[in-house]
Each structure stands twice: as C-alpha cells, then as structure tokens.
Image (tube, rainbow, N blue to C red):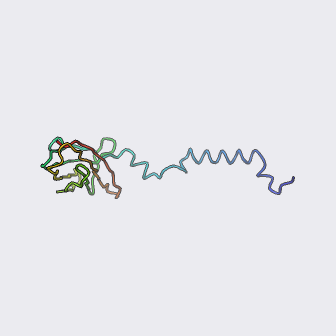
Amino acid sequence: MNSRLPHLRSRSFWAAVCLACAFAVVLGFSSTPASARSLGNTKVIVTDTSPAQPVAGQTFTMKFELSKLGTRLHMADAACYATAGGKLAALMYQGTDGNVGTCKWAVPSGASGKTFDGILAAKKDGGVWVYRGFDLPIR
C-alpha cells in the first residue's frame, strides 16, 4: 500500500505532533485566560458583624473588604443577598465607601433556630465581581 502522504505514516511526524501538543499545554495555550488566573487570590474578607451572630427580630450588619494577598483593594460596588430560614431577608442597606462594603438586613422575628444564609459580593475596579457565601445560626 503506497500512500501519497508518507509523512502521515512516519513515527517522526507523530512524535513531532505529540511534542507540539505537550509544549502547548506546558506554555498555557489551553489554560485559563490571564485575567482569570490573576483573580485566584482575590477574596472577600468579613471584617465585622453586628451583633456577633444574627438575632431574630433585630437588624444584622456585616462589613467586608476586598483583599488580594493581604493587600486591601478598592471596591467599586457592593451587593448583598440573604435568606432567613429559606425566606428572603429584607435588605435595609447595601453599599461601599470604596474600601469597606456594608450589608444590613432585618432578621424576621420568627426565624430563631433557623439559619441565615447569604452572599456578599464586591466589584473590583475592572468590573469583575468577587463573592463570599455565609451560613450562620439565628439566635
């Protein structure tokens, strides 16, 4: 059987193809974009809660910062979401002063013994959002 494409049947051709694929993987041609890799160390850090844990019938406030490798980053925007016992908690305030994000909710009076679950979101200057979830018992 004579092939008109002898280069496709030789070992050296396939060895070169395998090496090219290996180099592509090693050099990152098939990895995540640089913007996604740079977000890997960016975190939302909770700095304060008032009171220390949610209490039924009272307001609950969380303050948080955006941090990368221990350095505080500027926060362009903040967003908050929480449920108390599986029902949406009333959001009284959400916002940022540029450095610290603040979320304030009204915890329903009948939610004692249930959980207060939610998400804090901080927007970086470049428009990328970073999230942190929480799950706290309600007293």
- Is 65 displayed left or right of 110 in the figure? right
Using the image as rendered, state which of residue 115 and residue 128 is in the foreground. 115
Displayed quadrant of residue 138: top left
Q: Residue at x 21, y 56 (%)?
A: 94
Residue at the extreme right: 1
Displayed quadrant of residue 96: bottom left
Q: Residue 87, percent across and down?
A: 24, 54
- Is 89 displayed left or right of 69 in the figure? left
Residue at the extreme left: 58
- Is 16 displayed left or right of 136 in the figure? right
Report the number of discs: 0
Q: Residue 85, percent across and down?
A: 24, 49
**Image quadrant occupied by the C terminus:** top left
Q: Residue 98, percent across and down?
A: 23, 54
Using the image as rendered, state which of residue 51 and residue 112 is in the foreground. 112
Q: Residue 43, percent across and down?
A: 32, 46
Residue 120's place in the image compared with 137, above or below, is below
Q: Residue at x 26, y 54 (%)?
A: 81
Q: Residue at x 42, y 53 (%)?
A: 35
